[in-house]
Amino acid sequence: PRLLLLGGCGRIGTAAAVHLMKRAPGPLEVILAGRKPERGKEAVEEVKAEVELGQGHDVSFCQVDWQKPGTLPLDGVDVLLHTAGPFDGEPTVLQEALEKRVPIYVDVADPMSYLDAAEALDDKFRDAECMALCSAGAFPGFSNILAMECAQRLRESGSNELQDLNFSYFTAGLGGSGPVNLLITNLGFGDPVPVFQNGKYAPQMVAGSEMRKVDFFLDEGDPAFKAVGRRDVWSWPFPEAGTVPRRLKIQGNSSTGMGTAPGIWNDILVALVSLVPRELWQQRGFSEALAYFSLPMVWVTDQFVKETHAMRVEATSPDGRNCVCVQTHQSFRRCVAQSAAEFVLHLLERRGFWGASPFPWQPGVYL
């Protein structure tokens, strides 16, 4: 199969390419798409240094500006993996993949407005016999899988209904992923947090507030206790607090929050959000300027903070029983990349690229 990887020259993109070729059960051609040939050459060498290409794999670079409509080289492409955020506009790349009938599309988007527009294309993807999986990173993405696992465990214990569902995340250190993550965070402060209240979808304008402490471990014997421990988190509009409860038909409330280190960054962000009007955060120029302004300070503090990523997903039944999933990883960018890559590999298996699959091909748009 032939895979075009948008954002392929970024830190998440190269990590995804490496994971794909290490885990693929058969030959895979990966094309790293980016705007700068110099960086493209470096990215190809980075991937080759970590992957054994003797198994029939191939990696190359293609100069592309994905933000220019109609410029994506999609002829003969079997998979389009889109990691080049932020996803704060219309799903134009998804639409282009549909027009070219690319069988498999995967991205790491998170804004609810983007996902609503993507879901509206479901019928067209079904008609085209193509599958699209949006929000397929670490969170949202892998976090959704953990939530479904929690719900299944509660069902197996005798609880057929779900009361509450809570998502909490912690990241420290950018891992070389640059200003994009900062920009995405800033833009989110202007959006409503997509939560459920009393079993009904009720988005709240609370991003960057509602500070609380979360245990990113199961008990003190858990390695995550030493690696992450208890951390402050604040609300942020991760879509899974809306999409997963809708799928599971919860009766109570959902929440979503994130935190970072050092702790003073949490205090600074919460203070800024309380002072700056929401409308300003929604303006890309303001959020982008603030991201670039704060980037040098983030780089400095990253020298003293170990790169870490963690998530905690907790589901509660109406009778008070709960199920908790905790995951930690040494690298945020690799966790996002590996999650997206695993989703791609699963869809390739469904498509039957490496032999008969036990899983059916189910065209449509999925979150």
Image (tube, rainbow, N blue to C red):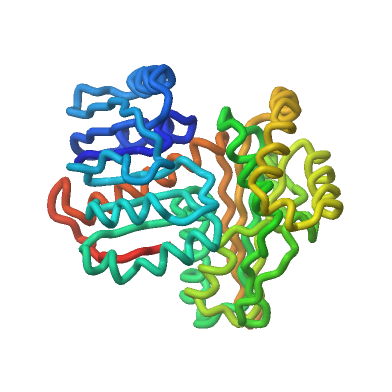
Residue 324 in view of the camera: yes
Residue 344 is left or right of residue 253, and the answer is left
Residue 299 is left or right of residue 53, and the answer is right
- Quadrant for the N terminus in the image: top left
**x, y (%) of residue 280?**
74, 52
Residue name at image x 64 percent, y 70 percent? 195
Residue 112 is left or right of residue 131, and the answer is right
Residue name at image x 54 percent, y 62 percent? 112
Choose between 35 and 177: the one closer to the eye: 35
Which residue ends up furthest to the front in the rendered image? 69
- Quadrant for the C terminus in the image: bottom left
Residue name at image x 16 percent, y 52 percent? 352
**x, y (%) of residue 146?**
50, 59
Q: Give the vertical position of 3 relative to 297 (above or below).
A: below
**x, y (%) of residue 91?**
43, 55
Q: Give the vertical position of 257 relative to 304 (above or below).
A: below
Residue name at image x 47 percent, y 30 percent? 10
Residue 321 in view of the camera: no
**x, y (%) of residue 354?**
16, 46
Which residue ends up furthest to the left in the rendered image? 355
Image mark count:
0
Residue 218 is left or right of residue 48, and the answer is right
